[in-house]
Amino acid sequence: MSIDKFLVEASHIMMFARSVGDDNPIYHDEEYAKGTGSGGIIAPPTFAQSSAQFDPDYFLRPKVGGEGWFGSGKEATGAKPSQESGGGGGGAAMGLHAEQHFEYHKPLKAGDVLTATSKPGNSWEKESKRAGKLKFSESVTEYRNQDGDLVITATGVGVQTERAVDS
Amino acid sequence: MLKENEIKVGDTHSATLVEDLKRTQIVQYAGASGDYNPLHTDEIFTTQIAGYPSVFAHGMLSMGLTGTMLTNYVGDGALKKYGVRFTNQVWPGDTLTGKATIIEIREEDGDKVVDLMIETTNQDNVAVITGNATAKIEA
């Protein structure tokens, strides 16, 4: 996965913060945010995951005019998506999301324009009682800002299960 | 930001992250994050094709909710690291409680920092997230 332009915008931060139950004004109130040590609106700690919005190939989004979406319409479907993409901070696109780790090098601010590049990390297998054979794979994504500075390193671990996880 | 002279190893902070999680909040997260995996929003696909009893929350929604508790505790822009494992699924109707425990206070790259152990549990006291975080504190 690589993203050429991840625009970090205030309204997107506001919507993201709402969705994770966070009403901290530093995520939506420009005037308030200016008066804090951050000097402006910043992004919540897991916001980098929404870079998926800016990945043209992200496979967990129905494509405009595209085919092969695997969710239900008239039928329950299950059509396989044509192409798998590492996507977002990794992990979720490779089955279920097993782990996610963020390292913050600089504050992520509204107005930043990021690039993201991912590379595969380790992979391993494990047997589990709840879901059969588990195949884990790691993806490491580096987010850099408009000055070329490393802002966030995100490591996602995805797991492919043999069957649906027993709950 | 936390102040070194006001905290000690073993201190905890906990908060209710969500009560009776609604499917609509999962949809809200799908829209904001861009992860439209039907496992999270499409009950028909998830029950009939994927074989789960219902849709379930994105792991990243649980991590995001837990992150809200965390930044409310350590302050804005203080986090240096935040990592989790998703240990159990989160279902509509779940009530989640997040807890951070101070396990070490130390120095890193000239900053005073605190290491935290993170755990988020559901209404049955089953852990859905375990993890750790490191945050800057005021000396």
Image: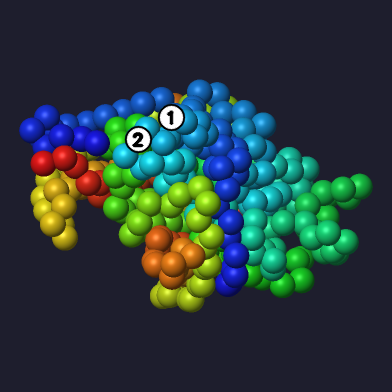
Q: Give the Cα separation between the discs numbered 2 and 1.
A: 7 Å
Q: Chain of mark 1?
A: A
> Which residue was labeled with disc 2?
A36
**In the image, which disc is placed on residue A32?**
1
Decide: marks 2, 1 in contact (CB < 8 A)? Answer: yes
Q: Residue B57's spot in the image, x, y percent?
A: 57, 41
- Disc 1: CA contacts within 10 A as few (<14), some (14-19) or many (>=20): some
The relative height of residue B123 versus residue A106 in the rendered view (above or below) is: above
Q: Residue at x 64, y 52 (%)?
A: B35
Q: Quadrant of the N terminus of chain B?
A: top left
Let me know if marks 2 and 1 both belong to one chain: yes
Q: Chain of mark 2?
A: A
Q: Residue at x 22, y 31 (%)?
A: B12
Q: Is A165 situated left or right of B108 in this image?
A: right
Q: Residue at x 91, y 47 (%)?
A: A74
Tag 1: amino acid: Tyr
Q: Is A98 situated left or right of A77 in this image?
A: left
Tell me the quarter of the picture where residue A35 sits: top left
The relative height of residue B43 versus residue A55 in the rendered view (above or below) is: above
Label 2 secondary element: loop
Q: Is B75 situated left or right of B104 in this image?
A: right
Label 1 secondary element: helix
